[in-house]
């Protein structure tokens, strides 16, 4: 659609002029620009520069006054124009930002998803110039109604070079290019304290490569820990302890590992369903003390790999190998070899495990 925008740019000469006017009580003249900032610039060029900033809304004309220029001469008719800073100019001086106007035809993608709005903080997800080979007819269409909520707001966008820019929409033309709905997919790659958010066209049979295109790509403050909590709570419900970051689970001889990879087939985040995701390093612990005793007993039956000569050596081994369980059930850290031997003696195929626990006893016979 055809629209007018303001783009935030780093333009130090302009900002310096605004700051100088602000510091001078809000007014500035061409001779002040030349003497204080742009000594090598002709006085007329300084005057044109101030008129340019006036056209952009940063200054307004405030009459004339007699003042000698750097050559000791008066300006035209012995007078020079005075420019007064506007609210827009004062804001730019205080924030050290400058908004450069641009006007043209743009492709505009606007998301209706509240998740996108919450993550990115805006509804515009991308504005780029249209493909020059696009021959679609222009139509009479009220674009202002489509994007009215975004007028004069500061919006972060992704340009064609995939650089992030900040813009404000300040005007529309009534003749617009076709504005149609596009079905998209959303991808979120979460890092420690930041997320890369990608919006892509939904893949279809007619154009399988279309899913590789990116309509919008943004970075948003999103903590990996918070996303993991939401996904694990959705998967395990109340069994996931978000404060201690563990999944409490009943004992199962089929899986004795306490650090696992969790596959979630249809993860849901903020009410939006995503494709399968795998979470690494999820901690699992027994759901209660009895389950924990069974877990420790089964682990020792299968995995004990050394001989023990004292209870102290055995307990040190337990803390080293089963520390995560003892972190939540510290009372099990005091279990003696005799207690464990008694429990294992009731199990089949426990001879070699018991022999390792009883090594010191065999030598004393």
Image: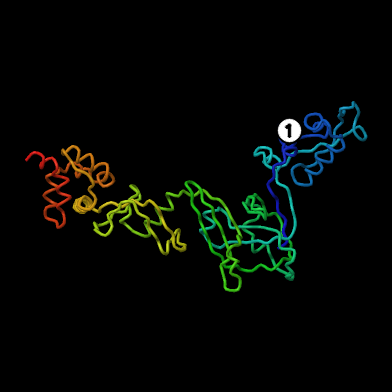
> Which quadrant is the N terminus positioned in?
bottom right
Q: Is residue 142 above or below residue 296?
A: below
Please give left or right for residue 310 compared with residue 157 in the image: left
Residue 2 % position (x, y): 73, 61
Q: Which residue is tagged 1?
A: 20
Q: Is residue 190 above or below residue 174?
A: above
Quarter occupied by residue 29 = top right
Residue at the image point whose x is 78% and y is 31% from the top = 37
Find the residue positioned furthest to the right.
77
Residue 71 % position (x, y): 89, 27
Q: Nearer the viewer, residue 259 or 107?
A: 259
Find the residue positioned furthest to the bottom.
206
Residue at the image point whose x is 73% and y is 33% from the top = 20
- Badge 1 density bin: few <14, some 14–19, many ≥20, Cα 10 Å: some
> Which quadrant is the C terminus positioned in?
top left
Q: Nearer the viewer, residue 55 or 104?
A: 104
Q: Is residue 364 above or below residue 217?
A: above
- As helix, strand or loop, the secondary structure at mark 1 comes to helix
Q: Nearer the viewer, residue 313 or 169?
A: 313
Q: Is residue 308 above or below residue 123?
A: above
Q: Nearer the viewer, residue 210 or 4?
A: 210
Quarter occupied by residue 18 = top right
Please give left or right for residue 309 compared with residue 88 in the image: left
Please give left or right for residue 271 compared with residue 322 in the image: right
């Amino acid at each position: 659609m055809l629209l007018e925008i303001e783009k935030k740019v780093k333009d130090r000469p302009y900002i310096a002029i605004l700051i100088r006017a602000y510091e001078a009580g809000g007014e500035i003249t061409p001779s002040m620009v030349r003497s204080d900032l742009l000594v090598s610039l002709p006085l007329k060029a300084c005057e044109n520069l101030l008129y340019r900033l006036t056209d952009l809304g940063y200054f307004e004309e405030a009459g004339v006054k007699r003042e000698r220029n750097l050559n000791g001469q008066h300006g035209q008719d012995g007078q020079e124009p005075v420019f007064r800073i506007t609210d827009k100019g004062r804001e730019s001086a205080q924030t050290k930002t400058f908004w450069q106007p641009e006007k043209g035809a743009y492709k505009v993608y606007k998301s209706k998803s509240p998740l996108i709005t919450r993550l990115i903080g805006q509804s515009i997800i991308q504005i780029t110039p249209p493909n020059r080979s696009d021959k679609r007819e222009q139509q009479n269409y009220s674009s202002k109604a489509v994007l009215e909520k975004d007028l004069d707001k500061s919006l972060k966008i992704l340009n064609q070079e995939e650089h992030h820019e900040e813009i404000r929409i300040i005007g529309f033309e009534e003749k617009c290019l076709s504005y149609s709905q596009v079905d998209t997919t959303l991808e979120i790659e979460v890092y420690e304290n930041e997320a890369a958010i990608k919006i892509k066209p939904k893949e279809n049979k007619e154009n399988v490569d279309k899913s590789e295109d990116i309509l919008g790509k943004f970075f948003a403050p999103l903590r990996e820990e918070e996303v993991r909590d939401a996904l694990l709570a959705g998967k395990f419900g109340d069994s996931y302890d978000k404060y201690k970051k563990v999944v409490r689970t009943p004992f199962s001889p089929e899986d004795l590992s306490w650090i696992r990879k969790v596959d979630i087939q249809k993860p849901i985040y903020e009410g939006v369903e995503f494709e399968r995701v795998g979470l690494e390093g999820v901690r699992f612990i027994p759901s209660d003390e009895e389950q924990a005793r069974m877990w420790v007993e089964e682990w020792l039956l299968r995995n004990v790999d050394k001989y023990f000569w004292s209870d102290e050596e055995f307990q040190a081994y337990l803390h080293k190998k089963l520390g995560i369980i003892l972190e939540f059930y510290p009372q099990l850290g005091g279990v003696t070899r005799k207690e464990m031997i008694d429990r294992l003696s009731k199990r089949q195929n426990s001879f070699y495990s018991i022999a390792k626990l009883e090594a010191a006893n065999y030598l004393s016979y």
